[in-house]
Amino acid sequence: MRLAKRTSNLFRPRTAAVGPGLDVSAFTRAIDVDPVTLTARVQGMTTYEHLVEATLAQGCVPLVVPQLRTITLGGAVTGLGIEAASFRNGLPHESVLEIEILTGDGEVVVARPEGEHADLFHAFPNSYGSLGYALSLTIELERVHPYVALRHVRFHDLTSATDAIGSIMASRAWADEPVDFLDGVVFGRDEVYLTLGRWADTLADAPDGRASDYTGQRVFYRSLRERERDLLTIRDYLWRWDTDWFWCSRAFGAQQPIVRRLWPKSKLRSDVYWKIVAFENRHRVVARIDERRGNPPRERVVQDVEIPLDRTAAFLDWFLREVPIEPLWLCPVQLRADGARGGTAPGQGSSPWPLYPMDVGQPYVNVGFWSTVPIRPGHVDGDTNRVIEDEVTALGGHKSLYSDAYYDEETFEQLYGGSDYSLAKKKYDPRGRLPSLYDKAVHKR
């Protein structure tokens, strides 16, 4: 059994389905937004684009809004989502109060941090539909301000940048100004920018006397090098990376001035680029042109990895030396101190989420890199990804499973749930109607 979805933000191809998928196309509404209790009940297939519109109308937003408009709330919870608020608000599943889940056994259960289905509640994040599908979720919200004021702070080496991240994560401030949002970009080992955002109520911090607009001709990631301060409306801030799919739109020529002027503004968005990628995956037009030109085949290296903060500089140094991909995205993250909402707070160093076991009290940095690399003579497709997996594991990190994975089954079990996952799978999908997490992530089922 699989979902009958027309779109996806996954970067791992899947084997063709052999039958009709489960139609969840009706589960796309924000059922209720309560600005008093700061909670919302939302159907699982609701995109963050639609969820944000519903919550902004009430003066609030989800605690973490992943960067791409068409990521669904259910997808961000059963997979993983992250954004610049994650250094203070954790991951999307941490703000979930309850989930209505259709299990692999065909039952609909309501899972909460405590109670009868608490095991499913804690095993659901990072299960990627291998335990069941979220029909609705009740989540926490936070109040918003009209604008987000930005400072782009340059660092000239990796260690000073990661030291600054640690200071900001601990104090939520930098140079006597509060920090409500934190992410960054590595353009090279001697050029790292941290973008520090804070809530703002006026245009006082706008360099041009008005909020910047990066939904048309201007490209957001380039602005980090061009100006020290900036200001965006809250809506434009949330989707600042979506217009150009971070910087990946350059692969389609969308950042060239002439192409940019001709490209409809409404089509400058991540789901349009994803359709182009899906077309290439099916028809290999560019790959065939490269073959005729004698260019080597290329390996897709599209990953997000969580590295403990104190080892992030070492990982970045290794990556920039071994893998020919720049820029890199940095997004600091730490689990919320109270662990699973409504449940018993775990002790220091323990994890309430067994399928993606980050430790409470441990600061991490998500490093995102999305490109391709040439396959060198004597190597095969997947070799670069395997080396990255080994380095991430050696440094005590984890990687998200939305893209290609190459782990052997024993290593995968150690990293992603082990006995906790096996027990939940036997209880909620005893007949194996849903592919296992390993089958989905590695075997691409």
Image (cartoon, rainbow, N blue to C red):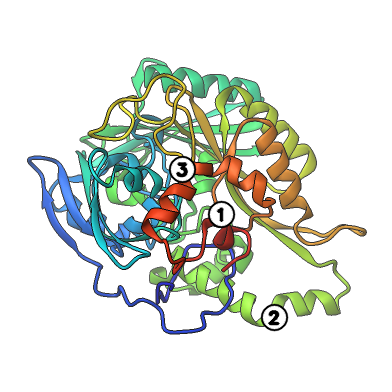
Task: Name which residue lies at 58% across and 41% down.
Answer: 415
The amino acid sitting under disc 3 is Asp
Q: Position of residue 273 (x, y in %)?
A: 52, 68
Q: Is residue 331 above or below residue 129?
A: above
Q: Earlier in the sequence, mark 2 or mark 3?
A: 2
The amino acid sitting under disc 2 is Val
Viewer-nearest residue: 401 or 65: 401
Q: How many numbered markers are drawn?
A: 3
Q: Is residue 298 above or below residue 175?
A: below
Task: Name which residue lies at 35% across and 29% down.
Answer: 336
Q: Earlier in the sequence, mark 2 or mark 1?
A: 1
Of tags 1 and 3, which is closer to the observer? 3
Q: Is residue 87 left or right of residue 417?
A: left
Is there CB contact under 8 Å for labels 2 and 1?
no
Q: On the image, numbered disc 2 is attached to which residue?
A: 285
Q: Position of residue 197 (x, y in %)?
A: 37, 33
Is there CB contact under 8 Å for labels 1 and 3?
no
Of the 4 image quadrants, the one containing the C terminus is bottom right
Residue 420, label in figure: 3
Task: Name which residue lies at 60% across and 35% down.
Answer: 397
Q: Position of residue 444 (x, y in %)?
A: 60, 66
Q: Dot 1: few (<14), some (14–19), or many (≥20) neighbours within 10 Å?
A: many
Q: Is residue 242 left or right of residue 247?
A: left
Estimate the spatial distance between the alpha carbons at disc 2 and disc 3, rounded to whole Å: 44 Å
Viewer-nearest residue: 187 or 67: 67
